[in-house]
Amino acid sequence: MTADLSRLLNALALVALDTILVLAFADQLWFRDLPCPICILQRAGFVAAGFGLALNLMFGPRPSHYGLAIIGAMVGGVMSADQVLHYIVPGTGSYGNAIFGLHFYSWSLIAFAVVVAGSGVMLMFDRQFESSSPPPLPLTVFPLTAVALLALLAVGNVASTLAICGVGLCPEVPGGYLIFHENLGLALLKSP
Amino acid sequence: MMSLPFLLFACGLGLAWTSRREAAMGFWVAGVLILLVLFRFHATDVLNLGL
């Protein structure tokens, strides 16, 4: 596999991760389905996994970058698995909306597993690591869009999480946007 | 507090954009460590599983 093909596949994978984060935002804003604390942490897991792919695009493919993607996906996968196990027994409830029959945390677990497996497969192709051009590599439109969108989504999640949780830990079941509470100023002052 | 991992990842991506790869990876490590700490704070319910 050439470095160019590797970069194309990394860009496609990063767009897929970006799409997951966009869908999570769409569910939150369009269907008013506020994310639970563990759901927010899973979003961060997707950004952590995408970070490794973004480095592959900016500096060229390296095993260490795939390592970041794998570890990020494993951390996110632990959180998804925790939530799946919480609701795995029928009749014990669920959290949020289901899409195509599975809840978001179940899809997350599948997506994180795919990132780990995909990174493992990519690591088997050594030729991609023999790049002749020195980093940083010039980004063409497609990889540039994928990386910029990931950065934008990370910043968007900073704002969203601050709006839902304020500056402290999130409530276990979010009741609304804390930022719209009239006593937010007092909550900020009182927080340790 | 909960937005900190996103902030660190965003800063890391900004550093990578300016060609500071090692610093970017440092921010990634800090973000993942904080992510794990936050998970520890929030995963308080014991799972009723027989393993």
Image (cartoon, rainbow, N blue to C red):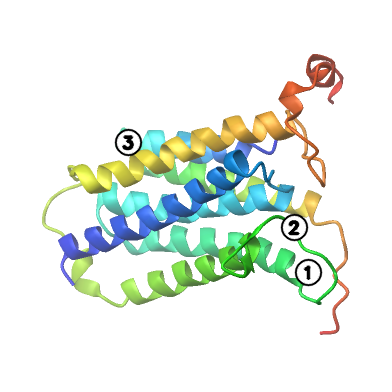
- Specify whether B5 is left or right of A154: right
Q: Residue A137 placed where, x, y %?
A: 19, 45
* Residue at point 68%, 46% (across, down): A35
Give me the chain letter of mark 2.
A
- Quarter holding the C terminus of chain A is top right
Which dot, 3 or 1, sits closer to the camera? 1
Q: Secondary structure at mark 2?
A: loop
Q: CA distance from mark 3 to mark 1?
A: 40 Å
SS of the residue under disc 3: helix
Question: Can residue A130 be seen in the rendering of this structure?
Answer: no
Tell me whether the residue at label 1 lies in contact with that at label 2, contact meaning CB atoms closer than 8 angstroms: yes
Labels 1 and 2 within one chain: yes
Residue marked by disc 1: A87
Residue labelled with disc 3: B17
Q: Of the numbered discs in the image, which one, if any, rests on residue A31?
A: none
Could you tell me how far apart the alpha carbons at marks 3 and 2 are, in whole angstroms?
Answer: 37 Å
Both on one chain, marks 3 and 1?
no
**For the residues tagged 3 and 2, is the chain the same?**
no
- Mark 2 closeness class: few <14, some 14–19, many ≥20 residues within 10 Å: some
Type of amino acid at the residue the image marks with label 3:
Trp
> In the image, what residue type sits under mark 1?
Tyr
Taking the image as shown, residue A45 lies to the left or right of residue A19, namely right
Q: Residue at x 57, y 44 (%)?
A: B31
| Residue B42 or residue B18, whichever sits in front | B42
**Tag 1 secondary structure:** loop
List the residue tagged with mark 2.
A95
Snapshot quadrant of residue A131: bottom left
Residue that appears at 59% across and 38% down: A29
Depth check, front residue: B49 or B21? B49
